[in-house]
Amino acid sequence: MLKATAGLGYRTVRSADKRVLWKFAYNFGYKGVRSVQRFKKRLKQGITFPPFIYISITNSCNLRCQGCWVDVDKPQEMISFDDMNKLINSAKQHGNSFFGILGGEPFMHPDLIRVLRAHPDCYFQIFTNGHHITDEVARQLKEVGNATPLISVEGTPSVSDTRRGRSGVLNHTLEGIKASVRHGLITGVATSVCQTNIDDLVQETWIDKLIAMGVHYCWFHTYRVVGPVPNPQLALEPEQVLRVRRFVMDMRNQKAIGLIDAYWDDKGQALCPAATGISHHIGPFGDVEPCPIIQFANEKIQDNDGDVFKTLTESSLLTDFRQTAAKATRGCVVLERPDLVKEIVTRHGARDTTIRQTATTELETLRSRPSQYNPGHEIPEENWVYRFAKKHWFFGFGAYT
């Protein structure tokens, strides 16, 4: 356990650019912890403002993935640089320093690098397919130093092509990973684990390959049955979700690579980051949503003259979602109780924030299915570093009491 943790530290110090490493340690590490402490203090006052905000800056993407909930095939929409700038500045006033950048494909937004440059005191995690990370883009990311690419890999070459709706997907993605590593970026790989890739990627050999490539961390999250074409045949069974959880625990103790998850606390109990209030989502139109897969909103980031703290803390939709979801399950309420999500949306008259305008129908056709919540089968954190971090700085925080 200690050997694996020390090995990760040694690998990262040797391979990451020193300025990139400093930005990660200070902007994400120190300031991120301080932001969570502020969050916990606000909770005691009955105020919920997430320390981590996730922003889908555009709906455009060069791929057509199975189960995608984003309108990637519709006319391009994107948050303007001015609105992004105002959003981040507003959140910074309340201690925030970390922002997740999603899409579509974030690198299709022409002002992405400009946003990173405008906020050198923040840290950004960019969820990307890696196809746009050329040596030039990686060089610019190294120059700004305050972003980590989290590059998605969905399986073998044939599985990747099927899952992602294009040919040659994996090769392009691997080139993006190599460029990121080559330029000293803290580089991550993410996988949405489903029926077609669990046997290929939830394997020690895959972790060893990532380490050999120079990847610093990986994130296994389970496939969500949502969107206009939800592909339910890809969903994992409860025993497979446990298998993924057990695998992550084992690899944390054995391998010199970070393994991230956001759906279990230090005791191994399931949780939903949106239900706890530790994160909410901004859509490409500027809509304020509970999480990326719940595409309904009553507020926009432009409301209240751009005061995002006021907008989020006064949102009755977000408050109701957190309370209702936490009472219903510790898992994903969208998977387990889509009927409750529809009730919340109807109760508040929330608007469909998709371009396709079929989100309500999609909710009605979803059937209840298991999520990560599996009472009696909890697998507590075994690595003391992860256990300590989760207990004090991430997730939980009394949402389910």
Image: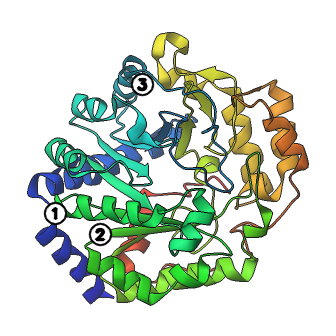
Q: Is residue 364 above or below residue 397?
A: above
The residue at the point 74 percent across, 58 percent down is: 225
Q: Earlier in the sequence, mark 1 or mark 2?
A: 1
| Depth check, front residue: 224 or 44 | 224
Mark in the foreground, 1 or 3: 1
Tell me the CA gap for discs 2 and 3: 29 Å
| Depth check, front residue: 241 or 31 | 241
Q: Earlier in the sequence, mark 1 or mark 3?
A: 1
Tell me the CA gap for discs 1 and 3: 29 Å
For this orientation, the residue located farthest to the top is 305
Name the residue tied to disc 1: 16
Task: Say which amino acid is labelled 2.
Answer: His
Task: Answer few, some or many: residues within 10 Å of disc 3's Cα (few below 14, many 20 plus, some between 14 and 19).
Answer: many
**SS for tag 3?**
helix
Task: Say which amino acid is labelled 1.
Answer: Ala
Residue 39, visible in the rendered structure: yes
Asked if residue 271 lies left or right of residue 350, the reply is left
Image spot of residue 63 (x, y percent): 54, 49
Image spot of residue 64 (x, y percent): 60, 50
Residue 51, visible in the rendered structure: no
Q: Is residue 285 above or below residue 151?
A: above
Mark in the foreground, 2 or 3: 2
Q: Disc number at residue 87? A: 3
Image spot of residue 159 (x, y percent): 59, 71
In the picture, residue 96 is in which quadrant? top left
Image spot of residue 43 (x, y percent): 53, 41
**SS for tag 1?**
loop
Q: Is there CB contact under 8 Å for labels 1 and 2?
A: yes
**SS for tag 2?**
loop
In the picture, residue 240 is in which quadrant? bottom right
Name the residue tied to disc 2: 216
